[in-house]
Image: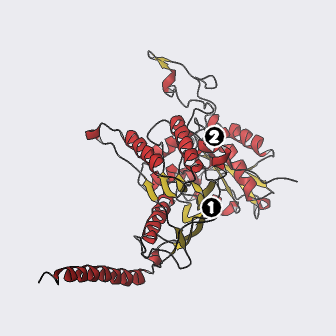
């Protein structure tokens, strides 16, 4: 009968909607998801409040949650693998679920503005069938973002400009971020191009850009400078200019000799990847590529064609110059002077003899640390050490440690590890 067919179809559709809603509610309860409020507009820049936000693909008990107010365009910096992309995806998913009237992986008390667009721009690959490189595809996506999004849009841009040179990538990223902020867009802009902080952005844009970073703790152990970083997966206000790419590379199995060589080469570059201070070559076959002409080898002005002296006395002299104090020499098998116990110390080790290698570290327990080093093998057991006590504490010790590593590396000494010399830490202010 034609009169009943429309009613049956409507009843079927209603049953499908109610069944879907019931299943969604049941799963949301099982996953500890909640429903956030939807607001049509906000009088200020606070477009959303996320309480206890966690990744939608993880169990709440096994994940780390974040709570924050989305009140502008977040410029997010963090080391590799610290969770910035995860946080962005979680925020985008929770916002989309909320504006659809569904439960999301967050706690009650959250709210989200009704956005007209939610635009996520992440990693891209080349598209040969359309004659697009990965960078070309990325630029096409950004062009679409700028055309479609405005002051009521939620946007997520992850590592824009990584497919080209650092200079061009940084300038493009800065210009795009400036345009997004000026247009009033809300969301996240994540980058490893730290030169973006040096760009003179328009005041109308910089007022809306909020600097955020992912928190990590750093406490490198003696044996492995790459395993001491711990990610918290928490976001806070601030700037992070340390990507710690070598830490991620080590955790995914890159050979130790490659990592050590990368540490040495990193000292030739500044933080933005440009050529920095020249470092003496360790052998005649080390020369920058742009210094090679028709097999003629030319060294930079500060490099020497002779292998620099690598004696322990010379290393101690540099050590004492940086520390501005006389070092205590600790012969093989000797315990350190009791006066060095119970205080922060920076120490220099000479390991082996053909050729000698050097190690710089800092500790609050020199006797225990030397014992740990001496158990590493025969050459370590016969090490000679020099140490100075730093009365102002651990921050000054780490600053001296970093400076000594850089000085020795530039002088051509063979260092076992220079991981702690890549960044010179600030010393505490003296009064």
Looking at marks 2 and 1 on the same chain, the residue that comes earlier in the sequence is marked by 1
* Residue 104 percent coordinates (x, y): 45, 74
Q: Which of the 4 image quadrants contains residue 278?
A: top right
Q: Dot 1 corresponds to which residue?
A: 45
Answer with left or right where residue 16 lies relative to residue 99: left
In the image, 41 versus 215, the foreground residue is 41
Q: What is the crowding at mark 2: few (fewer than 14 residues within 10 Å), some, or many (at least 20)?
A: few
Q: Which of the 4 image quadrants contains residue 52?
A: bottom right
* Residue 42 percent coordinates (x, y): 60, 66
Q: Secondary structure at mark 1?
A: loop
Q: What is the crowding at mark 1: few (fewer than 14 residues within 10 Å), some, or many (at least 20)?
A: some
Q: Residue at x 39, y 70 (%)?
A: 57
Q: Is residue 251 visible?
A: yes
In the image, 210 versus 276, the foreground residue is 210
Please, is residue 344 above or below residue 324 in the view?
A: below
Q: Quadrant of the C terminus?
A: bottom right
Which residue in the rendered view is the most extreme toward the left?
1
Discs 2, 1 touching: Cβ within 8 Å: no
* Residue 96 percent coordinates (x, y): 43, 66
Distance between mark 2 and mark 1 Cα atoms:
24 Å
Which residue in the rendered view is the most extreme toward the front?
3
Q: Is residue 256 visible?
A: no
Q: Dot 2 corresponds to which residue?
A: 199
* Residue 127 percent coordinates (x, y): 30, 42
Q: Residue at x 42, y 75 (%)?
A: 102
Please, is residue 276 above or below residue 16 in the view?
A: above
């Amino acid at each position: 009968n034609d009169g009943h067919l429309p009613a049956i179809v409507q009843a079927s559709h209603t049953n499908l909607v109610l069944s879907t809603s019931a299943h969604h509610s049941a799963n949301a309860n099982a996953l500890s998801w909640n429903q956030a409020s939807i607001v049509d507009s906000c009088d200020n820049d606070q477009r959303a409040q996320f309480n206890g936000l966690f990744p939608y693909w993880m169990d709440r008990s096994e994940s780390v949650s974040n709570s924050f107010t989305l009140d502008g365009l977040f410029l997010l910096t963090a080391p590799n693998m610290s969770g910035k992309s995860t946080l962005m995806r979680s925020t985008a998913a929770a916002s989309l679920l909320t504006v659809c009237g569904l439960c999301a992986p967050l706690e009650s008390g959250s709210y989200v503005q009704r956005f007209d667009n939610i635009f996520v721009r992440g990693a891209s690959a080349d598209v040969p069938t359309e004659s697009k490189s990965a960078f070309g595809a990325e630029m096409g996506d950004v062009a679409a973002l700028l055309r479609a999004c405005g002051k009521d849009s939620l946007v997520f841009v992850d590592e824009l400009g990584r497919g080209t040179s650092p200079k061009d990538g940084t300038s493009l990223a800065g210009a795009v971020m400036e345009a997004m902020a000026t247009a009033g867009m809300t969301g996240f802009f994540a980058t490893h191009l730290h030169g973006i902080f040096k760009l003179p952005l328009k005041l109308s844009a910089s007022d809306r850009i909020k600097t955020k970073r992912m928190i990590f703790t750093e406490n490198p152990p003696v044996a492995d400078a790459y395993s001491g970083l711990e990610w918290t997966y928490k976001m806070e206000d601030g700037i992070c200019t340390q990507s710690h790419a070598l830490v991620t590379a080590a955790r995914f199995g890159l050979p130790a000799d490659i990592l050590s060589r990368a540490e040495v080469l990193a000292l030739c570059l500044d933080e933005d990847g440009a050529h920095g201070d020249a470092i003496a070559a360790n052998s005649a076959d080390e020369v920058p590529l742009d210094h090679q002409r028709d097999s003629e080898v030319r060294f930079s002005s500060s490099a020497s064609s002779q292998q620099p002296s690598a004696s322990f006395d010379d290393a101690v002299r540099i050590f004492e110059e940086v520390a501005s104090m006389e070092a205590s020499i600790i012969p093989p098998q000797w315990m350190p002077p009791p006066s060095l116990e119970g205080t922060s110390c920076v120490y220099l080790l000479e390991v082996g003899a053909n050729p000698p290698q050097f190690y710089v570290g800092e500790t609050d327990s020199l006797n225990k640390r030397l014992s740990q080093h001496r158990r590493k093998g025969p050459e370590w057991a016969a090490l000679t050490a020099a140490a100075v006590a730093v009365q102002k504490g651990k921050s000054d010790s780490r600053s001296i440690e970093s400076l000594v590593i850089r000085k020795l590396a530039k002088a051509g000494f063979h260092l076992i590890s220079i991981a702690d010399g890549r960044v010179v830490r600030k010393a505490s202010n003296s009064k």
